[in-house]
Amino acid sequence: QVQLVESGGGSVQAGGSLRLSCASSRYTYSRNCMGWFRQAPGKEREGVAIIYTGDGSTYYSDSVKGRFTISRDNAKNMMYLQMDSLTPEDTAMYYCTTDPVARRLNSVVPCINWPYNYWGQGTQVTVSS
C-alpha cells in the first residue's frame, strides 16, 4: 500500500508561483507512472503533468505546458510540481498519483490515462486575478 500526501497549495495572485510537493510512503519500483492531476468545480479531473520513471519521459497538458514543471527526488520519495505564471484558470484541487508499471513502456503516453490506484487527498490552489 502506498500513501501519498500533497502539500504546498494556497492562494496566489495571477502571475505568481507555487510549488506543490507529494510525499510518498514508498516508491519501491523502478518503473512508475506518476504525476499531477487537477479538478476544478464542475469540471472533469485532468492530468496536467505526468512522468514515466522508466525513462524519465514527461507529459504536460497544453494548458500548462511551458509554465509547470514536474520533478522528483527518489532519495526522499518526493515528487514536485513547480507552477509558474499562474492564472485564475489554474484554480483547482491538485492531486498527486502513482502506480507501479509491471511491463516496460515505450513512452509516457500510456501513463496519461493510466488506471491509477494510489491518490493523495489533494491540495487546493486558488489563483486570483
Image: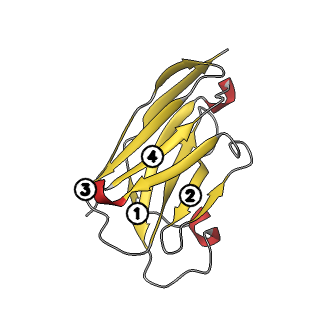
What amino acid type should be assigned to the residue bearing mark 4? Tyr
Q: Which mark sits nearer the N-terminus, 4 or 3?
A: 3
Amino acid carrying mark 3 in the image:
Ser
Whether residue 129 is situated above or below residue 83 in the rendered picture: above
Q: CA distance from mark 1 to mark 3?
A: 14 Å
The earlier-in-sequence mark between 2 and 1 is 2
Mark 1 or mark 3, earlier in chain = 3
Q: Which residue is mark 3?
A: 25
- Separation of disc 4 and disc 3 at Cα? 15 Å
Rendered image: mark on residue 103 = none
Image quadrant holding the N terminus, namely bottom left
For label 1, the residue is: 117
Find the distance from the CA under tag 4 to the CA under tag 2: 11 Å
> Is residue 27 rendered to the left or right of residue 47?
left
Among the 4 quarters of the image, the one containing residue 74 = bottom left
Q: Residues within 10 Å of mark 1 (few under 14, many from 20)?
A: few
Check if mark 2's residue and mark 3's residue have beta carbons within 8 Å: no
Residue for badge 2:
50
Residue at (51%, 84%) from the top-left corner? 104
Q: Residue 80's mark?
A: 4
Crowd class of label 4 (few under 14; some 14 to 19; many from 20; radius 10 Å) = many
Which residue is at 70% across, 46% downward?
65
Q: Earlier in the sequence, mark 4 or mark 2?
A: 2
**Quarter assignment of residue 85:** top right
Q: Position of residue 58 (x, y in %)?
A: 60, 61
